[in-house]
Every structure is written in structure tokens, then in C-alpha cells.
Amino acid sequence: QVQLVESGGGLVQAGGSLRLSCAVSGRTFSSYCMGWFRQAPGKEREFVAAISRSIGITYYLDSVKGRFTISRDNAKNTVTLQMNKLEAEDTAIYYCAAADSHGIVVAIGGYDLWGQGTQVTVSS
């Protein structure tokens, strides 16, 4: 059974940085496209970033381009989201997700597995 566990959330001032990590159990990590999503209070869950399973193609939400970086380490079964220049609008619960796909998956419905989420709060 594959499990995803996020860590690294917290409280940070606007302009600061946080690094989220997602540890994936199981030996099939390298076969998944990995993504990060977020859900702010009263809003729907939205796509943030994704990275393909092999050559590491990445894709980002427009509002985080140039500030967030997604990466993966297939040897360590981890995916990270480096978040710089954080803004109050980035405040949300951030979720790690896995999709059994060769390419990049953006749609929430394309993801098969989800973590429990980690809170990110950016104070202005």
C-alpha cells in the first residue's frame, strides 16, 4: 500500500521561504507523476505544481512560477516543493499527490493517491 506523508509546513512572514517534503512509501514511486495542490479556507483545491515520473518535466500554476520549485528524488522516494517569496495568498493546506501517468497531470481527478496535507500560513 502506497502512502504519502507531507512535512515542512508552518508559519512564515510574507517574503519568506518554506520547503515542503512528501515521503512516499512503497517501491513504485518512480512510476508516478507527483503533484502539489493547495486548498485555502472557503476555496476549492487547486493545482500548484507537478513533476513527471522520469525525466522530471515540471509544470506550475501561473501565480507561483518563478517562486516555487518542485523536485523529486527517486532514490529517496521524496518530492519537495521549495517555496520562496511567499505571499499571504499562498496560505493554504498543501497536499502531495501521486498520479499513475507517463506525463504531467494537472487535473485533480487524475491523481490516485493523496497525503493528509500540511498547513502553510503566510502572515502579511
Image: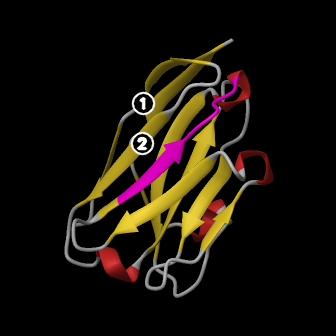
Q: Residue at x 70, y 51 (%)?
A: 66
Q: Secondary structure at mark 2?
A: strand
Examine the rendered structure and indicate whether residue 92 appears above or below residue 98.
Answer: above
* Total marks in image: 2
Q: Position of residue 37 (x, y in %)?
A: 58, 49
Image quadrant where residue 53 sits: bottom left
Residue flagged by tag 1: what amino acid is it? Gly
Q: CA distance from mark 2 to mark 1?
A: 6 Å
Which colour scheme appears in the figure? Answer: secondary structure
Examine the rendered structure and indicate whether residue 52 appears above or below residue 16.
Answer: below
Q: Which residue is mark 1?
A: 9
Q: Which residue is mark 2?
A: 20
Q: Nearer the viewer, residue 106 or 124?
A: 124
Q: Earlier in the sequence, mark 2 or mark 1?
A: 1
Q: Nearer the viewer, residue 72 or 118?
A: 72
Q: Position of residue 14 (x, y in %)?
A: 64, 20
Q: Residue at x 69, y 11 (%)?
A: 124
